[in-house]
Amino acid sequence: MVLTRGDDYPIHQTADPIAYAGTDRNFYDRYYFNGYAPGVGEDGFFAAALGVYPHLNVIDASFCWLMDGKQVNLHASRGLAMERMDTQVGPIRIEVIEPLKKLRITVDAPDQGMRADLTITGRAFPLEEPRFTRRNGPRVLMDVTRLTQNGSYAGWVEVDGARTDVTGWIGTRDRSWGVRPIGAPDAQPPNPPIVPQFFWLWAPCAMEGGDLYFHTNDDEHGRLWNRRAAWRPLGGGIADEHHYDAANYEVRWRQGSRQAQAAGLTLTAAHGKTRVEFDIGQTFMMLGLGYGHPTWGHGRAHEGEAVEREDFVVADLDPMQPHHLHIQASVGVTMTLPDGTVRRGKGVLEQLAIGPHAPSGFTGLLDPA
């Protein structure tokens, strides 16, 4: 039997039941959220994610809390049973209250000392990013659609009995779906061998009067293969979206790492150049959401329903371990418009630099700055 609850909704794209998602075993469908205290320099950060992997028949989720440099991660995984409409994994649940505007995250894990009840409301209509399509030789590395939306939170987070009210915090959510590496790695490497390379910066920022979005994927020479910078006013829709004609970034990497010490953007439009400066703050390890995690990687099968808590001090981790490369840094943001008007805000600068990247001076797989 392949009929599931989704089949009662008019959302089919082909003659197949909803349980089937094309033919690529790496197809995934994912929610991501982060949130942080709105004041520049204020401590506190949380993140959540839930991923569905139809062809692996697995669903997993994570919830993370970062305070005073200590990161606490809650991981959960179970079999999907081909039912994609059930968005609860152990103690973690995602609920769509109003599509494209309001979602709720709940966590109830008393045995792991973690609970939360959070609702995010979008500041404006979501931004659809350009489709991400990339091949390694003849193989599809990724073919992904993603929407991104900044929002404000209401609710609370409780860790080990200490409750923090996060009402008024801001942050970002995204939804992505398509093909990218998940589950167990491919047992047969490319022929001829290809040196892994992936360079990624992502900076969704909640600003005075609106939202600034920037991302780039570069190849080993620094040539972009997917990049966009856009502005969306508060409450705005697609018609209000402004795309910059060009976007250039600068990063100064922290010595001995591939983590940014300072960064900025120059955005070009017909009316002139806009300058954006990022003041780098606390570091969140994307490992906590399963990215590159040796045990809790996306789509990995566990026996039955599995739940585990993980704690670490971020400063104690070796930044050059492969599974520590992927981070988000909270950033204070200063945006100076062509007429000299200054807008301030806060956001994140996500970073992942694997392999060579000529503008950064990286020549090998894992050489640090």
Image (spheres, rainbow, N blue to C red):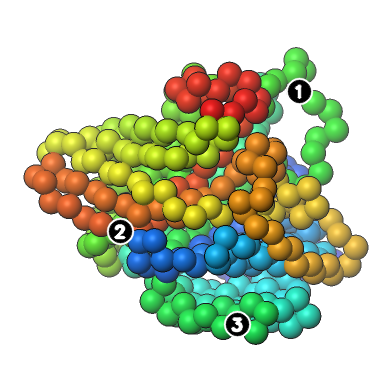
Which tag is nearer the camera, tag 1 or tag 2?
A: 2
Distance Cα–Cα, label 1 vs label 2: 44 Å
266 vs 124: above or below = above
* Helix, strand or loop at mark 3: strand
The mark that comes first in sequence, 3 or 2, is 3
| Residue 190 disc label | 1
User: Callout 1: 10 Å neighbours few (<14), some, many (20+)?
Assistant: few
Q: How far across and down, in percent of the image, does residue 276 sit?
A: 28, 44
Residue sitting nearer the eye, 316 or 220: 316
The mark that comes first in sequence, 1 or 3, is 3
| Residue 162 disc label | 3
Q: Which amino acid does label 2 sit on?
A: Gly
Q: What residue type is labelled 1?
A: Pro
Q: How far across and down, in percent of the image, does residue 369 sit?
A: 54, 28
Which tag is nearer the camera, tag 3 or tag 2?
A: 3
Residue sitting nearer the eye, 66 or 205: 66
Please identify the quarter of the rendering in which residue 2 is found: bottom right
110 vs 182: above or below = below
Q: Do the residues labelled 3 and 2 touch (CB within 8 Å)?
A: no
Give the residue at the far right of this rendering.
Answer: 303
* Helix, strand or loop at mark 2: strand
The residue that mark 2 highlights is: 345
